[in-house]
Image: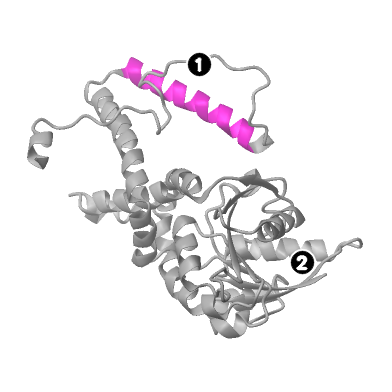
Amino acid sequence: MHVNVSIIGLNRVSVSLALALKRYQGQPKAQHTFTIIGNDSQAHPMKTAQKMGAIDNFDIKLLKATENANLLIISAPPGQLEHIYSLLGPELKPGAVVLDITPLKQQAVAWAKEFFPTNAQGAPTAYLVGITPIVNAKGLYTSDPGVEAATADLFEKTEFLIAPDAQCPGEAIALAEDIIRLVGGQPRFMDPAEHDGLTVATEALPMLLGPALFYALQQSEGWSDLRRMVNPSLALMMNHLRTQTAEDLGVVLKQSRADLVHHLEGLIGVLDELHDILEENDTDRLDAFLAKVTSEWEKWDIKRHSGKWEDVQKLEALPGPLGSMGFLTLKPRKKAEGEDEDKK
């Protein structure tokens, strides 16, 4: 079976998917072949992806790049998505399946309902399936989101989250599952709302913390000296400012607002307690905190590298020095005196 694929937005993730499909196609027993056309707002990612063998051709014009596509993969910057859906949606071929691999799925579902073509009975004739690839442990700590960092094995033996709308036909979901398995992944299902609630912690929260940290330092009295001393430890925390526009960041943060506030309350609660520990020079509590965090991180890191998330033997829950360390269960931050009254 031959499939015409269009990839909208070329980056490490989307080009890795393309490389994995081409790798599969090169196997002697491959049952499917792919013609992959790339589209991006800039020429460099398209030319680079073609030189890497990830795509067969490219076109900077969206509708030209997608005119023959049976399968489309959307990985464009968040600030461009509504325009892409509005332009692309009405032109989709009957039976076309769109895999959206951008961070949030609920808004994509809404755009699909608004812009995708329908038949005389009002049923859609093209279909959206939201998926989120989870990179393997080998590629987890690479911060470069560019095409050059793409590899064919980035998703080998990893999970792909599939978050389809409830009305999405089974055939479209099955196609998404097939693609996931061809690139080496395993599907895991959740609904779009559940997906987005979790993605806020892994995507939106870091998008907010990096700019917030930069702003706090940039506004400090020592900035004239600090700005000349930035090394990777700080630069990597601010990486979203280098790779995303203000519009891209704003779209994700606004769409994540309610869940983001919840996670921020938990994080601020931890920072408040750390502030107190440091202010009081309570070295015992600081040592206990660091020991607990390091221990929990090591447990997570082992499971992340092995992919074995279920313990053979249930571990005894250990109380942390600051209470539960999970953002979903942390106590809210301490409110300043009179804060509630000010909001009334």
Helix, strand or loop under label 1: loop
In the image, residue 287 lies in the stretch drawn in magenta: yes
Residue 339 location (% of width, % of height) = 12, 36
Residue 192 location (% of width, % of height) = 50, 51
Helix, strand or loop under label 2: helix
The residue that appears at 67% across and 36% down in the rendered structure is 307
How does the figure colour the protein chain or chains?
A: one colour
Q: Residue 188 vs residue 23: left or right?
A: left
Q: Is residue 14 visible?
A: yes
In the image, residue 99 lies in the stretch drawn in magenta: no
Q: Which of 2/309 is in front?
A: 2
Query: Which region of the structure is painted magenta?
Result: 283-304
Amino acid marked by disc 2:
Lys
Decide: few, some or many residues near mark 1? Use Cα within 10 Å; few <14, some 14-19, many ≥20. few
The residue wearing badge 2 is 22
Q: Residue 157 vs residue 90: left or right?
A: right
Q: CA distance from mark 2 to mark 1?
A: 46 Å
190 in relation to 266, above or below: below
Amino acid marked by disc 1:
Ala
Q: Quadrant of the N terminus?
A: bottom right
Q: Is residue 104 visible?
A: no
Residue 317: which disc? 1
Decide: few, some or many residues near mark 2? Use Cα within 10 Å; few <14, some 14-19, many ≥20. many
Lower sequence index among marks 2 and 1 = 2
The main secondary structure of the magenta stretch is helix
The residue that appears at 55% across and 85% down in the rendered structure is 61
